[in-house]
Image (cartoon, helix red, strand yellow):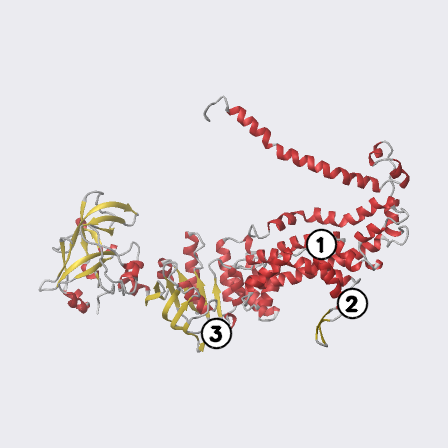
Amino acid sequence: MAEVTLEKVNKVYDNGFHAVHDLDLDVRDGEFLVLVGPSGCGKSTALRMVAGLESISSGKLTIGDRVVNDVHPKDRDIAFVFQNYALYPHMNVRDNIGFALKLRKASKSEINERVAEAARLLELTDLLDVKPGQLSGGQRQRVAMGRAIVRRPQVFLMDEPLSNLDAKLRVQMRAEISRLQHDLGVTTLYVTHDQIEAMTMGDRVAVMSKGLLQQVDTPQNLYDRPDNLYVATFIGSPQMNLMMGQLALGAAPTVTIGKQTLSLTASLIAQRPDLRAFDDREVVVGIRPESLDDASLARETDEGRTLEALVELREGLGSEVVAHAMLDATGPKVETAQRDPEATLTGTGGVEIVARLDPRTAVKVDELARFTVDVDTLHFFDPATTLAIRG
Amino acid sequence: MTAADPALEPVGARTHRVLSKVPTGVLWVIVVLWTIPSFGLLVTSFRPEADQISGGWWTIFSDPTLTWQNYHDALFSPPGGTLPFSEAFANSMAIAIPGTLVPIAVAAAAAYAFAWMDFRGRHWLFIAVLAMMAVPLQMSLVPLQQLYSGGAHVSIGSTTFILIPDLDLNNKPIAVWLAHTAFGLPLAIYLLHNYIAGLPRDVFEAARIDGANHFAIFWRIVLPLAKPAIAAFAIFQFLWVWNDYLVALIFLGQNRDASPLTIQLVNLVTSRGQGTELLPAAAFISMVVPLIIFFSLQRYFVRGLLAGSVKG
């Protein structure tokens, strides 16, 4: 088992494209770390550099105690699971799984033993003599996993291994890979663009965008305490509602959104001491959809704890109702986005907000609805830097 | 007159129907025109000498006398000093098999290197190899023959440098193998390169991580996966070498005992006109192998023609 450490790792392609900027990442021994981000954010490049399939332009990559920047992939003691599985089409499952051992000149009996063990673990025993072309997507996926585990590597590297599976199988394989990784205890770096995969599988999740690492933390912490606007909107579905708000931290602290005012609790401000610096200034306010609920269902509605908005769409999901509503406010005006240029959004006349409501809700389309706001879960961001205001 | 006019519809449809049959009809005419002479030759090869002289092959319908004598004579006791066809057949095999395998071995390795190995000048070298396809075979025959018999020397002042020693290859089968290998390589490299370059990159990366070096990747991954393209080229190359007359005549023409069927076919008719009756039978002996190959492997012909244009 081993730790994987990236220190100020950069990737600049020959054509000048800077795919990965100063990436610092530390995958702890036995940890399942998920690297997540939209396509083109550099996450696959980072993974391929760890595997040795791409050269490292600058920086230091350590696996275990060894600096492996210039070590051949086969000598890094890693296994790679490809998005398209990359099975050898002319070999049956047994030979596919045993190929690496065969190249290492392992004895026949050892190969057979270890292939059989991997096959048992992945329930492939009946398919050992079948060629990949006759396997279903899920089975191919498992063969690819088998090829990785049979080598007993120090590190698993997986590049979107579930993206070619249908939704149902993906959920099943997600659990299977998690269980397998847990049982084997192998350090794993897993790349995906799917935030649900990231949240459900990772011990920790690293969010990347435009070649920059945005935040690394446990899934719950990423969700509860995003470092910046990018992470706040990337993690969570439906995504966090963002709007401009005017802070007023007098005796009765409030934030004014459009023409409506929410009162802030003392504990909220105590937890976010940096808010003081933004007194009388505009900030970006973030409200998770589940922090909103139908006010008509609440036993008591305190003054200054609700927002009114015009319902535009109502989606019943059985367990909840997702309401899309137009709030009279301004969208986030982010002046300079140092960490993520794409977060630069211009303000508009109204802001569409999404609320996850109790299914008993009576909100109707084209009618004004009043939503309670769980004020203690509000998020605040500096519009100049897009960073979270916490302190 | 508009396109919607219903009265015109059937006329257009009928014209279309009739016209659509034209290509098929033309094909059938071509098939018949090409097959009849071959069929006639086949029939003639079984007719006794006297019958061959007295009338055309179609008299077989009124006077069906057939014999294996021509085949027997051609194979084992041809007139004059001609090499028996059974031996020439073996010679043809001895030329065509290495003449096919050697270029494939070289071309497959070269194609893999051009497609998946990073080395300096790869692009220009590949273009240079492809440019060789434009060199006519006939142009290189004489220089090649000189190289075989005299080697290559450069004299500067009184000193002579030997670039290629005199290997005395002329009139030995290896001279023909080498010539066919050289002439076949550009096309072989081109065809195999297109196919091998189209194999998925992931598979190569997986093999590298699994610990395969270039040789292991070539031997265990590329060769098995490129089988369809290799088979297609092998067929073309084998038939080309088997049917070749010119290269064999230039490099092997003086060596009766090693010469292939094509040369013996020409030599069969002696200066006194003996052996004419054996020609059809001899021709069919030399055609047997191409026919077998064509009919048993014809699906690869089509694939070979598509190599590179359609993946997989």
Q: Is residue A9 left or right of residue B207?
A: left
Q: How far apart are marks 2 and 3 (CA)?
A: 50 Å
Looking at the rendered structure, which numbered label has been put on residue B238?
A: 1
Q: Taking the image as drawn, is residue B183 in sight?
A: yes
Query: Which residue is under mark 3?
Result: A70
Mark 2 vs mark 3: same chain?
no
Q: Distance between the residues labelled 2 and 1?
A: 26 Å
Give the residue at the far bottom of this rendering. A65
Displayed quadrant of residue B221? bottom right
Q: Identify residue type, mark 3.
A: Asp
- Chain for numbered disc 2: B
Other residues around mark 1 within 10 Å, as few (<14) / some (14–19) / many (≥20): many
In the rendered image, residue A213, in percent from the top left (x then y), is placed at: 34, 66
Do tag 2 and tag 3 residues touch (Cβ < 8 Å)?
no
The secondary element bearing badge 2 is classed as loop
In the rendered image, residue A173, in percent from the top left (x then y), is placed at: 44, 58
Count the labels in the image. 3
Q: Identify residue type, mark 2.
A: Asp
Viewer-closest of A358 and A51:
A51
Query: Which residue is under mark 2?
Result: B168
- Chain for numbered disc 3: A
Question: Is residue A39 positioned above or below A156 on the image?
Answer: above
Do tag 2 and tag 1 residues touch (Cβ < 8 Å)?
no
Among the two numbered marks 2 and 1 on one chain, the one whose residue lies closer to the N terminus: 2
Do tag 3 and tag 1 residues touch (Cβ < 8 Å)?
no
The residue under the point 22% across, 43% down is: A364
- Chain for numbered disc 1: B
Q: In this view, does A10 lie to the left or right of B15?
A: left
